[in-house]
Every structure is written in C-alpha cells, then in structure tokens.
Image (tube, rainbow, N blue to C red):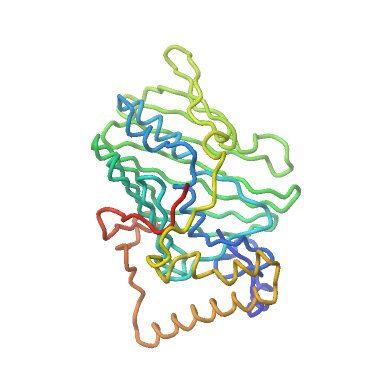
Amino acid sequence: MFSMVTEGQKQETKHVRPGSDLTRFQLPPAFNLPKSQLQCYGEQIYCTSSDLLSKCNSGQSHLDRFISVVAWSISTTRPFIFGYAPYNPILGETHHVSKGNLNVFLEQISHHPPVSALHATDEKENIEIIWCQNCVPKFHGTSVEGRVYGKRELKLLNHQESYEMNSPNLLIRFLPVPGIDWIGNVNIRCKESGLVAELCYRSHSFLGFGGSQRSIKGKIFDSLSLKVLYEVEGRWDRTVTVKDKQNGNVRVIYDAKQVHSGLQTPVLKDAKSVRATESALVWSELSEAIMKKDWDKGREAKKFIEERQRELLREQQSMGETWIPKHFVASHSKEGGWECSPIQRWVPAAPIIAL
C-alpha cells in the first residue's frame, strides 16, 4: 500500500511531518512482504474459497443480488500484517491470474501518483469487474492513513445491472497500540434498481477504548422511497449479518472464515506465456532474497529495479513523452481520482492459476 524510505532518500525523511505524502518513500527489504501491491489488489478478487460472484449472479430478485454484492464487497477487505508492506509496483507492471472461469488482469498505469487498474471477467457467468485505485498515504504523527481513491464497478451482464462502490481507507496506527485497520464510509449503489448500501467501517478510538475494531455497521435502502430495508452489522474479519426491517429476521450474509479458509498459493501452468512485466517475474530476485533473509542481495535487487524505473522516467521526460498504459485507457475523474476503461472486452485465461 505504501513504503517508507530508501538509502538514497534518508535526507528526505528529515522533512516528514504530519500531512506528508509517503508515496515516494521506500522500505528496506527487511520490512517488505515478498509480493507486489499489484498482487495484493488481485488477491482481493481471486483469493476466495467461496464463489461469491456466482452467488451475486444467481439471485432471483434485485434485492437478493444486491445483498450478495454487499457481501462480495466486504470480502475484498483483507487484514494486513503490521510492520510489513508489499512492493510499490513499477510503471507498466502487470499481474494476470485465473481462478476457475474468472480471469483477472491488472496493470500499474501510473507510478507517481501510484495508480493500479484491474479488469476481471467471467464469460460463463457473464460478469465483469473494472477497478481503478489510487492510494495516497498521509503521515499523521502517530498513524498513517491511506486514503483510497477510485471506483469499483461490478457488472452482472445477464441482469443488465451495474454496481458502483468505493473502498474504505487503511489506517496504520503506531501509538498507543500498534495495529492496522480499515476505516471510513463505503457506498454501494445499483443504478438500475435504485438500491443503495451505506456501510461504516470502524476502529478503536485513539486510546484503544470505544468503538469496535474491524466492525461494520450500516443499512440497505431504496433510494427512491428512502425506505430502509435492512440493517447491516458485524465484523469484516468474522461474520456480517443483515436484519430485515419488516419482520426482524436476522441472517448471516458473510463469513470471513468460510470465504478465506484453505487458500493456496497460485500455480504457474504455462511459463512461456508469462509476460516480462508480470509482478512475480519483476520482483523474483528480491522476493527470493527476502525468503532467504539475504538482505544484502535484497538491497541490491531492489536498488536495481528502482534505478531502472528512474532511468525509464528520465528518458521519457527528456523526449517529452508521457506513459501510455498498454491495456487500459485512463483519465482523471471529476472527484479527483482516476477512471479506467479496459481495451479488451474479455480477459483471456492466465498462465498463473489460483486453486
């Protein structure tokens, strides 16, 4: 999501103050997870042991499908390990994985600011996901808040329904109790049915009292009549329920243990078809060094990638060129974030398979 400082940027850290943007700072390899942030974004879509997308598609009514979409949206919220962060993706980096009939493709379409674009399709279910995300981490003294900009769009093409939603923000707290949590408001809207969900992700208060860590509370309502249909409550790392406002019935719509249990590392099925820009290939030497705890080799591998990135940007600037994504058409949105449109209609099957 973000990183802190490199050897060549020690002088810059003297100027880090509350409100500072941390997107240009890098962590030393000892504090990196052995994967790219692009892979982490992709995992939010394909790393599930339950086929929640199929359930979204099979609902018999607008309301049934909407509730399933709410559950799917919650499933993309994953816990992080405090003190470690994935690599910042390089410009043009890609990640391509298939899970069953779902094919997922991501591209890093901007480096500063860091913007990632995702396109996922399931031709059998006739489902499409388009997701453009820009995380801006700000330092606030005792914490870092990663403000997540961009729009997620889930299309159930068989039903001619489109669901738009945003992401909660990531809070990394150093004091008084270290921890990582998702916070903020998430709105999910179906333009065709007029149904809307307003969810609030909550954390502990500053001193660790009050509030409920990893909790979700909200409602589902009809935007035309403003009638509240369901109350939503629970924890995104455990279970989430909905309460029918008409009859008082309560049922579980999301079980994190069921959705995330038994996951396995993706498997390479076709090495010849892997792009040179694939995340696992770009960062292979660094990841291997981290796994072996060879920090000298890790620093060298990371420095090589960073220098190559800077050289690419210098060459583009000297020729007056700007980077053009190869797989997406990108633009700035009116809200200040980014929007993207995939060039391909359907994502092809990937050489990397999630089991």
Residue reaching furthest top?
Answer: 247
Pick the front one: 124 or 229: 124
Q: Quadrant of the N terminus?
A: bottom right
**x and y percentages locating residue 197 in the rendered image:** 42, 33
Q: Is residue 42 left or right of residue 321?
A: right
Residue reaching furthest right?
Answer: 176
- Residue 183 in the image: above or below residue 143: above
- Residue 348 in the image: above or below residue 324: above
Q: Is residue 338 left or right of residue 168?
A: left
**What's the residue at 48%, 27% (across, down)?**
253
**x and y percentages locating residue 106 in the rendered image:** 40, 59
- Residue 277 in the image: above or below residue 169: below
**x and y percentages locating residue 212 in the rendered image:** 65, 34
**What's the residue at 51%, 24% (across, down)?**
252
**What's the residue at 41%, 66% (across, down)?**
274
**x and y percentages locating residue 267 in the rendered image:** 49, 55
**What's the residue at 40%, 83% (across, down)?**
317
The total number of labels drawn is 0
Q: Quadrant of residue 236?
A: top right
Pick the front one: 235 or 54: 54
